Amino acid sequence: GEGIYAALWTAEELSRTVPAGWRDLPAALDRYARLRARRQHAKALLCEAFQHIIRRPWLANSTHWLLSRRQPVADAFIGVIGNSYSPAHGLALMARHAFSP
């Protein structure tokens, strides 16, 4: 799943980046590399946060409790895990729905 998503994202982003910068291909590829690094950094931070939760049973149980009682939070969580949302967007949705009445 994750590898397939990364491959598809790479193909899509390169298909946008390369034609737009065809006259200066090294600069276009440099822009792509910076964008890819930013996306990977955000995903790596999110994975570290998940590992932090998983290693602590009380935190994992609290997360389960929240996700099982707030469907919009669970939907946003799955959206982040499934790469439908960027980590920043998904976490913002989760926070909004977690703290709304």
Image (cartoon, helix red, strand yellow):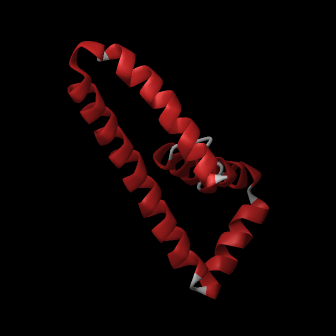
Q: Position of residue 19 (x, y in %)?
A: 38, 15
Q: Residue at x 78, y 64 (%)?
A: 68
Asked whether the viewer can see residue 100, the reply is: no
Q: Position of residue 37 (x, y in %)?
A: 34, 48
Asked whether the viewer can see residue 12, the reply is: yes
Q: Residue at x 59, y 52 (%)?
A: 3
Q: Is residue 94 above or below residue 30?
A: below
> Which of the two residues, 78 or 97, is positioned nearer the viewer here?
78
> Which of the two residues, 17 or 87, is positioned nearer the viewer here?
17
* Total marks in image: 0
Q: Is residue 31 above or below residue 2?
A: above
Q: Position of residue 90 (x, y in %)?
A: 56, 47
Q: Position of residue 89 (x, y in %)?
A: 51, 43
Q: Residue at x 71, y 55 (%)?
A: 74
Q: Is residue 84 above or below residue 53?
A: above
Q: Residue 53 appears in which quarter of the rendering?
A: bottom right
**Seen in the image, is 29 located left or right of residue 68?**
left
> Which of the two residues, 56 or 22, is positioned nearer the viewer here?
22
Q: Residue 67 appears in which quarter of the rendering?
A: bottom right
